Image (cartoon, helix red, strand yellow):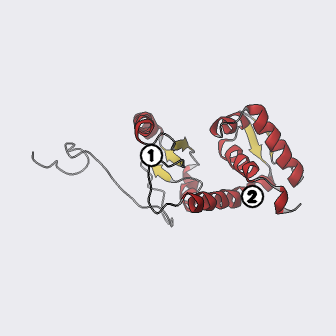
């Protein structure tokens, strides 16, 4: 097999199936029909001579080859997306970027609906995907680009090249660890 035989969209499909663990959810995320996603996955399987994903509870599980490919494909797609989409400045009105987030259950339930509503108003083409890797893998997921942001109480996330700590609170809140400023 030669690289010229692979359509970039097949790699996008592979990456999305790998991240979601489900062909139907991958199709939805890529604005494809489920049959089109299955057909694309079948083409890629034929080109690579590997099933790539096998049926599992609730979706699909990657084969060993798919596991080896996943990080490389994700980084390559991220690099292409960043390079092609570079304008020198992030413009939420024009951006079509997908952000992959890890959020604790509490954070996701409390903030994700408001965040999505805000994006619908200010950055209509930006997509959010929640991709919660196991806690022990969060640092590696940040470093590899599998996730863009991890939000929550995560004391076990250390020794990562891309992570920084941040705490944000409204100025009128005094329970964030410091007294609120006087009006």
Q: Residue at x 24, y 50 (%)?
A: 177
Element class at badge 1: loop
Please determine whether, in this image, residue 87 is positioned above or below residue 94: below
Q: Which of 173 and 157 is in front in this view?
A: 173
Q: Is residue 51 visible?
A: no
Q: Nearer the viewer, residue 154 or 101?
A: 101
Residue 166 — which label? none
Which-is-in-front pick, marks 2 and 1? 1
Q: How crowded is mark 1: few (under 14 residues within 10 Å), some or many (20 or more)?
A: few
State the residue at coordinates (54%, 50%). Answer: 135
Give the residue at mark 2: 69
Lateral position of residue 45 relative to residue 32, left or right: right
Nearest the viewer among 140 and 24 is 24
- Evaluate if marks 2 and 1 touch, with contact meaning CB atoms under 8 Å apart: no
Q: Give the left or right position of residue 108, taking residue 141 as reference.
A: left
Task: Pick out the residue farthest to the left.
Answer: 183
Left of 33 or right of it: where is 157?
Answer: left
Task: Tell me if residue 88 comes above or below residue 118 in the rendering.
Answer: below
Q: Mark 1 points at which residue?
A: 93
Report x, y in % for residue 149: 48, 52
Q: Residue 131 falls in which quadrant of the image?
A: top right
Query: Residue 64, located in which quarter of the rendered image?
Result: bottom right
Residue drawn at (74%, 32%) of the image: 34
Residue 70, picture quadrant: bottom right
User: Which residue corresponds to the image point at 55% horizontal and 42% vertical from the top-left?
Assistant: 129
**Secondary structure at numbered mark 2:** helix
Distance from the alpha carbon under mark 2 to that under mark 1 = 33 Å
User: Residue 12 at x, y = what percent?
Assistant: 70, 49
| Rendering coords of residue 72 (x, y %) | 70, 61
Question: Where residue 73 appears, x then y in whole percent?
Answer: 70, 58
Residue 81 visible to an observer of this rendering: yes
């Amino acid at each position: 097999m030669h690289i010229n035989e692979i359509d970039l969209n097949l790699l996008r499909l592979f990456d999305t199936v790998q991240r979601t663990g489900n062909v139907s959810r991958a199709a939805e995320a890529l604005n494809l029909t489920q049959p089109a996603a299955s057909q694309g996955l079948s083409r890629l399987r034929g080109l690579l001579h590997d099933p790539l994903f096998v049926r599992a509870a609730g979706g699909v599980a990657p084969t060993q080859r798919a596991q080896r490919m996943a990080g490389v494909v994700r980084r390559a797609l991220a690099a292409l997306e960043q390079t092609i989409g570079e304008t020198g400045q992030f413009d939420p009105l024009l951006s079509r970027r997908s952000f992959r987030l890890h959020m604790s259950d509490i954070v996701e339930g409390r903030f994700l609906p408001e965040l999505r509503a805000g994006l619908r108003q200010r950055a209509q083409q930006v997509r959010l995907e929640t991709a919660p890797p196991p806690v022990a893998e969060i640092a590696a997921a940040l470093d590899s680009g599998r996730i863009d942001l991890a939000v929550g109480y995560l004391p076990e996330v250390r020794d990562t090249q891309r992570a920084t700590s941040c705490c944000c609170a409204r100025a009128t809140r005094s329970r964030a660890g410091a007294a609120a400023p006087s009006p």
